[in-house]
């Protein structure tokens, strides 16, 4: 257990960041699932709408360090590619 004031504060901050990161990742996973279900159901309108909602969430998580920036970029790219296959 931390005994210095700075270590106690750092521990408190780490817990807040951890809970925020978990919530963000969970939200992203839910959004990705909705996109994938729309793609699987061959519904291009729903897929586009879901994709438009989840891209900013993934980008923000990548910018803040919740996800690695290249991981975020890869997720966005792969989802976009799958949605675009519905058009062709």
Image (cartoon, helix red, strand yellow):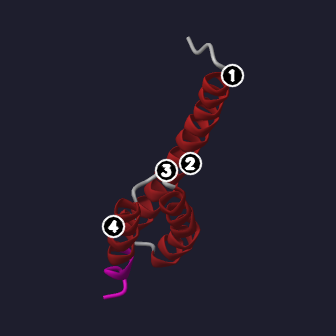
- The image quadrant where one finds the N terminus is top right
Picture coordinates of residue 75, whole percent (x, y): 37, 64
The circle on residue 5 is 1
Residue 19 lies, with reference to residue 52, above or below; the image says above
User: Which SS type dominates the magenta stretch?
Assistant: loop
Direction from residue 2 to residue 70 in the image, left or right: left
- The magenta span reads 83-88
> Marks 1 and 3, Cα distance to the nearest angstrom?
26 Å
Q: Dot 1 lies on which element?
A: helix
Picture coordinates of residue 86, whole percent (x, y): 35, 80
Q: Find out whether the residues at labels 4 and 1 contact each other: C-beta distance under 8 Å.
A: no
Q: Which residue is identified by label 2?
A: 24
The circle on residue 70 is none
Q: Which residue is identified by label 3?
A: 66
Which of the pair 10/76 is nearer the observer?
10
Disc 4 packing (10 Å; few <14; some 14–19; many ≥20): few
């Amino acid at each position: 257990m931390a005994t210095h004031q700075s270590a106690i504060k750092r521990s408190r901050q780490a817990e807040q960041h951890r809970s925020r990161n978990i919530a963000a990742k969970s939200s992203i996973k839910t959004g990705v699932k909705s996109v994938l279900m729309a793609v699987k159901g061959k519904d291009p309108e729903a897929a586009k709408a879901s994709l438009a909602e989840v891209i900013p969430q993934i980008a923000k998580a990548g910018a803040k360090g919740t996800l690695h920036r290249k991981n975020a970029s890869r997720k966005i790219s792969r989802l976009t590619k799958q949605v675009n296959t519905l058009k062709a």
